[in-house]
Amino acid sequence: MNVAPRTPMLDRRALGRALSRAADAAVADILKASRGEGGHLARRIGVTGPPGAGKSTLIAALARHRLARAGRVAIVAIDPTSPKTGGSILGDRIRMDALVDDPRVFIRSIASRSATDGLADNLPEILAVFDDFGFDEIILETVGVGQSEFAVRELVEVELLVLSPGAGDQIQAMKAGILETADIYVINKADQPDAAKVEAELKATLALTSPGDPPAVLRVRADAGENIAALDDAIEAAAARQAADGDGARRRRARQRIKGLVWRQLTRILADLPQEAFEEPLPDLYATVLSGLAEEGAA
Ligand SMILES: Nc1nc2c(ncn2[C@@H]2O[C@H](COP(=O)(O)OP(=O)(O)OP(=O)(O)O)[C@@H](O)[C@H]2O)c(=O)[nH]1
Ligand SMILES: [Mg+2]
């Protein structure tokens, strides 16, 4: 008898516990628990854009297509406003009700806490849990058009920027450089009158910032699922280009995890130093901080 290969059942409670542990773990514990690299990696798709552009609606529509290609998909929303909650919160910021009961989908909202770039300072560790639990893909929603775009870019393989009509001002307001970070540009709310205008404006801007090789721009209607299949194909193509880079994703993961861990440790060491330490000559202060980092690593 031919039995189709099946993804083993997901232990949601174990996953929930592992995520909470990763969110709260001290750096030393993370180092201790590290099992060496080389394991399975979930592909990461970042979805970013201004508030209300339709990111969550788009992700809900997109997830259905991604599930046809992947066995298990996690949706992680970085929520800049909500306080930290134990489980997944499915408030009105997340429009994914239809996916909640799908056993192949896991949805989690994460408070951004105090990191200066608007991301949780331990986000690399939290995302790594999904690798360990055998997820094929993570779709990561982040709000904003500021610092977080640059930080997210390092965390994902494929980055989508979602804009909507009325975004003309948003395009103007985006800092130079942010527009260039995405692989795929999505104009959502194609049903609204100004969609074509926003698309033209965006294309004109991209022609200046990426002359010769303008990235994909797609007009979609997330709430009706229109043109989402084309977006799904564009993601697949962008992912294939990334995959050609061999172990690029693995190296990128290692780089941002170590950066995150050292940053957290540095922040703590600086907070714990007595005021007098900052009156010492800079080379001495530097040596003090470095030895603090070395002690933590060895702990
Ligand atoms: N007309 C129209 N409305 C849409 C479309 N897609 C989403 N919306 C609506 O736009 C509003 C915002 O959608 P969300 O998906 O919550 O947007 P978001 O970018 O995730 O918002 P935040 O997470 O709050 O930043 C909701 O009322 C959606 O129903 C679309 O294609 N057309
Ligand atoms: Mg949202």
Image (cartoon, rainbow, N blue to C red):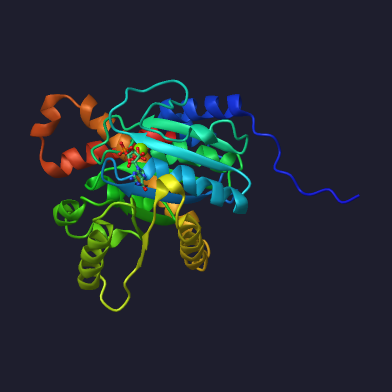
- State whether residue 14 is above or below residue 77: above
Image quarter for residue 292? top left
Residue at the image position 65 percent from the left and 33 percent from the top: 10
Image quarter for residue 288? top left
Quarter containing the C terminus: top left
Q: Quadrant of ligand 2?
A: top left
| Residue positioned most to the bottom | 212
| Residue positioned most to the right | 1
Residue 46 shows up from this direction: yes
Q: Position of residue 202 (x, y in %)?
A: 24, 63
- State whether residue 286 is above or below residue 169: above
Residue 37 shows up from this direction: no
- State whether residue 100 is above or below residue 147: above
Residue 166 appears left or right of 214: left
Q: Position of residue 223 (x, y in %)?
A: 41, 44
Residue 227 appears left or right of 36: left
Q: Position of residue 203 (x, y in %)?
A: 26, 67
